[in-house]
Image (cartoon, rainbow, N blue to C red):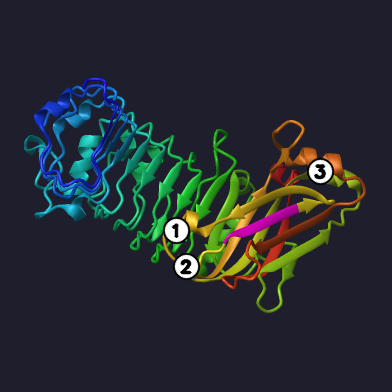
């Protein structure tokens, strides 16, 4: 079957793979996920699979990776999550015996072999028992890597080599409970999910480069140790250089930063809160310098998922409406006070069917008034899963970039 493109063996009770499987040279996707009785694979299994792009070996019980994996010259997505957890014996290095080094940890050896796969764009190493010492120093060799999943590992900081990943866009760190600092991220990063990193105390996200995306998102839900450092971090996070490429950040906390000029506070328990302000510039020409609007919402959650709707209007014109679903970036309930900070620099133009700079809208709809309305509410208005406590608005002015 040399034309077979997809082989799906997930959750089967298979114990061995026949050597003839290497003749499936037409495979583009090969999944063995959760084959917990599979203890070994033929050493030359991948030697003829030049078109293989997706390989899922997560949750299987092998003790070493076949050396032919380095011949996968077109591999794009590789899943190795939960391998050590599922091993039936004491974990051994996932490497051929000829290249094992007793002084190195198994997880380091595993990726030392994979560093040859410079076509990888997605690497899943979730729950592989990584520590600070065992994490590979040469991960920066994966020059095409765009997504890295390190959830539920034991690392205490991000290895400096990650900054060499010039194309890395997404980093998942959910439940890395030993993680204390988050630095050394490449400017290309546009999404970081650090949900439930209970030890996280400090973070720093580099200003975007000229080629960085304008929709960067960062999730720090349930990272309650950040609260004591929050007021030091937030002015840096929303400085002009940081604000340029920031769309959305979520942090623990309950207070709108002091530098937000316009604020509103809810009374008691409410699932809806609105803020309406009239900007009191002395001359309408000042509106031309408004580059965007930073918005901050202080929300309290009670352990259940809440679908939240946010609305932004200027002079009655609907600029932006979006939904936030906490379930999409955390696998479990979360509680307490969190701040949602957003930066609106674009709007959807129905005439061109494309996103346009916020300044174009301001010049079009603003004459002698600049009336901003924002609101946050639960889609299910009767639910008590969330309380909208406070919100604030901060105008981002063009002249601040030049200062």
Return the x and y of residue 112 as percentages of the image width and height: 21, 38
Q: Earlier in the sequence, mark 3 or mark 1?
A: 1
Residue at disc 1, secondary structure: loop
**Residue holding disc 1:** 330
**Residue holding disc 2:** 334
Contact check, label 2 and label 1, Cβ < 8 Å: yes
Q: How far apart are labels 3 and 2 at the CA level?
A: 38 Å
Image quadrant holding the C terminus, namely top right
Q: Which residues are magenta?
A: 307-312
Viewer-side label of 3, 2? 2
**Residue holding disc 3:** 362
Q: How far apart are labels 2 and 1 at the CA level?
A: 8 Å
The answer to whether 8 appears left or right of 166 in the picture is left
Contact check, label 3 and label 1, Cβ < 8 Å: no
Q: In this rendering, does residue 82 appear at all?
A: yes
Q: How far apart are labels 3 and 1 at the CA level?
A: 36 Å
Return the x and y of residue 166 as percentages of the image width and height: 43, 35
Return the x and y of residue 236 as percentages of the image width and height: 58, 55
């Amino acid at each position: 079957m040399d034309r077979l493109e997809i082989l799906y063996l997930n959750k089967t009770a298979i114990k061995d793979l026949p050597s003839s499987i290497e003749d499936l040279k037409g495979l583009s996707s090969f999944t063995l996920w959760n084959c917990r009785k599979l203890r070994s694979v033929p050493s030359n299994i991948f030697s003829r699979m030049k078109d293989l792009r997706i390989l899922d070996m997560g949750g299987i019980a092998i003790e070493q990776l076949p050396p032919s994996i380095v011949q996968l010259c077109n591999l794009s997505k590789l899943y190795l999550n939960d391998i050590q957890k599922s091993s039936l014996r004491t974990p051994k290095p996932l490497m051929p015996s000829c290249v094992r080094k007793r002084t190195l940890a198994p997880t380091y050896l595993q990726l030392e072999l994979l560093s040859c796969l410079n076509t990888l764009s997605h690497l899943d190493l979730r729950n592989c028992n990584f520590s600070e010492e065992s994490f590979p120093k040469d991960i920066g060799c994966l020059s095409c890597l765009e997504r890295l999943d390190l959830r539920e590992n034991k690392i205490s900081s991000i290895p400096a080599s990650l900054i060499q990943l010039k194309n890395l866009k997404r980093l998942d760190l959910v439940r890395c409970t030993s993680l204390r600092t988050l630095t050394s991220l490449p400017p290309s990063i546009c999404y970081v999910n650090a949900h439930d990193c209970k030890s996280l105390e400090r973070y720093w996200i580099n200003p975007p480069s000229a080629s960085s995306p304008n929709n960067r998102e960062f999730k720090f839900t349930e990272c309650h140790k950040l609260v004591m450092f929050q007021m030091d971090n937030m002015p840096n996070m929303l400085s002009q250089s940081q604000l340029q490429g920031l769309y959305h950040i979520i942090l623990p906390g309950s207070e709108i930063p002091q530098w937000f000029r316009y604020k509103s506070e809810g009374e008691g328990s409410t699932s809806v809160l609105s803020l309406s302000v009239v900007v009191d510039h002395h001359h309408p020409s000042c509106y031309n310098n408004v580059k965007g609007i930073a918005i901050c919402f202080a929300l309290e959650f009670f352990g259940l998922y809440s679908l939240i709707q946010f609305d932004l209007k200027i002079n009655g014109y609907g600029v932006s409406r979006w939904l936030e679903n906490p379930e999409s970036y955390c696998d479990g309930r979360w509680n307490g006070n969190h701040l949602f900070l957003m930066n609106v620099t674009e709007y959807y133009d129905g005439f061109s069917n494309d996103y346009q700079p916020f300044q174009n809208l301001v010049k079009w709809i603003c004459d002698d008034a600049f009336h901003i309305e924002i609101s946050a509410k639960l889609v299910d208005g009767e639910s008590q899963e969330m309380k909208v406590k406070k919100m604030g608005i901060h105008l981002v002015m063009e002249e601040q970039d030049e200062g």
